């Protein structure tokens, strides 16, 4: 029988890079650099609610850390430390080794130390906490948007939700578009470098986990503003772009979620800097609308306004 301690030693203990004391003691010790404050966030993923029970363990390991890294990016924080609390229904070493491989692949990609956690028996649940550094006072908050700000979004939107609908048999994605959409769903790439650069550019920022409209809605609410968006300008995979005239497909980029792209607002005076940043990071940054002092969220498509309900996207029929 493998003990809990063997599991921790085998699957959750790796050398650390910027930690005083990591896994193995009653608490970990870290010291943020001088002039920095800590950004802290936690996310819980429950099997059957947030992911399918049979989700590939490597992908699950990657994604459970990546969604937290994305929260750091949205604040303009540099992710450095993480803790992992995991409940396992049984000890399946093949599953554990794949999960840990995916988790550490993400940790290495973003230079993050796993510094502690908890391992227990129970319905499969994964709770990841993350801590990052921000120069004091430099965090990008939801509440900083100003009327007339440009609204920007990184990468493409809608592919993960489209992939999920495909797996559920609700749509059929063309063979040529499927790998890109599945990758976006299973191994999202948090926009850390973008978030760090936005500290001096953006007035507000959020990462898209629940869908563009819902998450942009949080910025608008916190900043007491409205917005208008142009659906024509939303960056989408070609497969989706070609179908954007079809109301059944409009929901994917607008309300699909799981994108883990950043939506941010910035004054018009930052346009040149933002397009340079896009080239420098080799990451598309699209101008998709503007904030307004009038409350409410208007989405235009080919000079027509779509009906959007408060709860999210409504097919306009
Ligand atoms: P305690 O009972 O004192 O809380 P544990 O036996 O739960 O300690 O854990 C022993 C050590 O292993 C601690 O340093 C803890 O942070 C770490 N640890 C436990 N589970 C995990 C995990 N899933 N990932 C990383 N570290 C873990
Ligand atoms: Mg414990």
Image: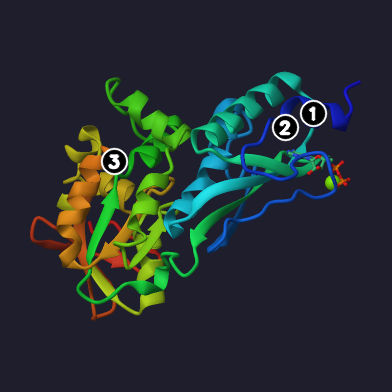
Q: Which residue is mark 1?
A: 9
Residue sitting nearer the eye, 210 or 249:
210
Q: Is residue 165 left or right of residue 2?
A: left
Q: Quadrant of residue 291?
A: bottom left
Q: Which residue is mark 2?
A: 12
Q: Quadrant of residue 91?
A: top right
Q: Secondary structure at mark 3?
A: helix
Tell which tag, 2 or 3, sits nearer the viewer. 3
Label 2 CA crowd tier, 10 Å (few <14, some 14–19, many 20+):
many
Answer yes or no: disc 2 within 8 Å of ligand 1: yes
Q: Position of residue 151 (x, y in %)?
A: 24, 61
Q: Are marks 2 and 1 in contact (CB under 8 Å)?
A: yes
Q: Residue furthest front?
A: 34
Q: Are marks 1 and 3 in contact (CB under 8 Å)?
A: no
Answer yes or no: disc 1 within 8 Å of ligand 1: no
The residue depicted at 79 percent of the width and 34 percent of the height is 89
Q: Which residue is mark 3?
A: 281
């Amino acid at each position: 029988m493998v003990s809990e301690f063997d599991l921790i030693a085998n699957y959750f203990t790796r050398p650390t890079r910027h930690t005083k004391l990591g896994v193995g003691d009653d608490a970990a010790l870290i010291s943020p650099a001088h002039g920095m404050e800590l950004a802290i966030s936690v996310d819980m993923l429950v099997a059957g609610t947030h992911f399918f029970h049979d989700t590939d363990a490597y992908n699950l390991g990657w994604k459970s850390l990546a969604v937290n890294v994305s929260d750091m990016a949205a604040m303009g924080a540099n992710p450095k430390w993480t803790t992992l609390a995991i409940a396992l229904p049984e000890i399946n070493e093949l599953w554990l080794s794949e999960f840990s491989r995916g988790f550490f692949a993400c940790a290495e990609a973003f230079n993050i130390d796993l510094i502690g956690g908890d391992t227990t028996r129970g319905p499969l649940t994964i709770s990841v906490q993350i801590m990052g550094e921000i120069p004091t006072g430099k965090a990008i908050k939801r509440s900083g948007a100003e009327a007339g700000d440009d609204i920007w979004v990184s990468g493409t939107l809608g592919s993960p939700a489209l992939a999920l609908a495909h797996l559920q048999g609700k749509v059929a994605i063309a063979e040529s578009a499927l790998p890109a959409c599945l990758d976006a769903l299973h191994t999202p790439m948090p926009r850390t470098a973008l978030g760090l650069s936005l500290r001096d550019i953006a007035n507000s920022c959020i990462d898209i986990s629940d869908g563009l409209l819902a998450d942009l809605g949080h910025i608008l609410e916190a900043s007491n503003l409205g917005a208008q968006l142009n659906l024509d300008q939303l960056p989408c995979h070609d497969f989706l772009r070609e179908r954007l005239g079809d109301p059944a497909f409009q929901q994917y980029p607008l309300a699909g979620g799981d994108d883990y792209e950043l939506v941010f607002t910035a004054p018009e005076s930052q346009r040149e800097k933002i397009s340079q940043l896009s080239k420098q990071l080799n990451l598309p940054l699209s101008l998709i609308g503007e904030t307004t002092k009038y409350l409410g969220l208007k989405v235009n498509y080919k000079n027509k306004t779509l009906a959007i309900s408060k709860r999210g996207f409504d097919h306009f029929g």
